[in-house]
Image (cartoon, rainbow, N blue to C red):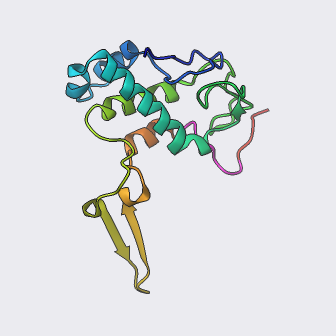
Amino acid sequence: MALTVETGAGVTGADSYNTVADISTYGVDNALDATSWVAGTTVQKEAWAREAATVLDGRWGSAFPGYQASSTQGLLWPRTDAVDREGWALSSDVIPAQILAAHAHLAILAASTTLAPDQASSASVIEVRGASGAGVKFGSALGYEQFRGVGIILASLLQSVGKGRRA
């Protein structure tokens, strides 16, 4: 089944933010190790793009600014009343570059790893204990891999407490 790509129009049934070609271009332009992506079939690449959109919206969606533009759109973007961390208004009919980049980055990663494993490996969990003996766990025990690169890509877009729209 072919991808249904979000254009900024609030496409019903959209399941990807980028085309396969756009994801491939992102990988080349950003010198990512896209060996598995390049070796994949079109069907596999479309599945990885879908997985990336699902993980992007599911993992970071609660921090996206504004509101979905339509109740019938397939993905969390486009959005209305959205501002970036500096308070600049975001267009309600354009997918921000940060979303497109984060989606492409995740899709390429999906070609070589599971983005949202059903069960965390105890080997990938680190527990840090303070002087009181209380522990905090870090790692995939949180239910998903921690993708710092994607967080960095999205940082200027995600909501920040106490910031509003610029005048």
Say above or below: 59 vs 4.
below
The image quadrant where one finds the C terminus is top right
User: Position of 145 compared to 65: left or right?
Assistant: left
Point out residue 3 in the picture as x, y percentages from the top left corner: 46, 17
Point out residue 69 in the picture as x, y percentages from the top left corner: 71, 26
Point out residue 125 in the picture as x, y percentages from the top left corner: 32, 63
**Is 1 in front, or is 112?**
1
Task: Name the image quarter holding residue 133.
Answer: bottom left
- Residue 32 appears anywhere in the view: yes
Residue farthest to the front, as pictured: 1
Residue farthest to the right, as pictured: 167
Residue at position x 24%, y 21% in the image:
40
Residue at position x 38%, y 33% in the image:
106
- Residue 102 appears anywhere in the view: no
**Is 17 in front, or is 101?**
17
Residue at position x 45%, y 35% in the image:
153
**Is 102 in front, or is 110?**
110
Say above or below: 89 vs 149.
above
Task: Name the image quarter holding residue 52.
Answer: top left
Magenta stretch: give its range.
Answer: 156-162
Task: Name the image quarter holding residue 115.
Answer: top left
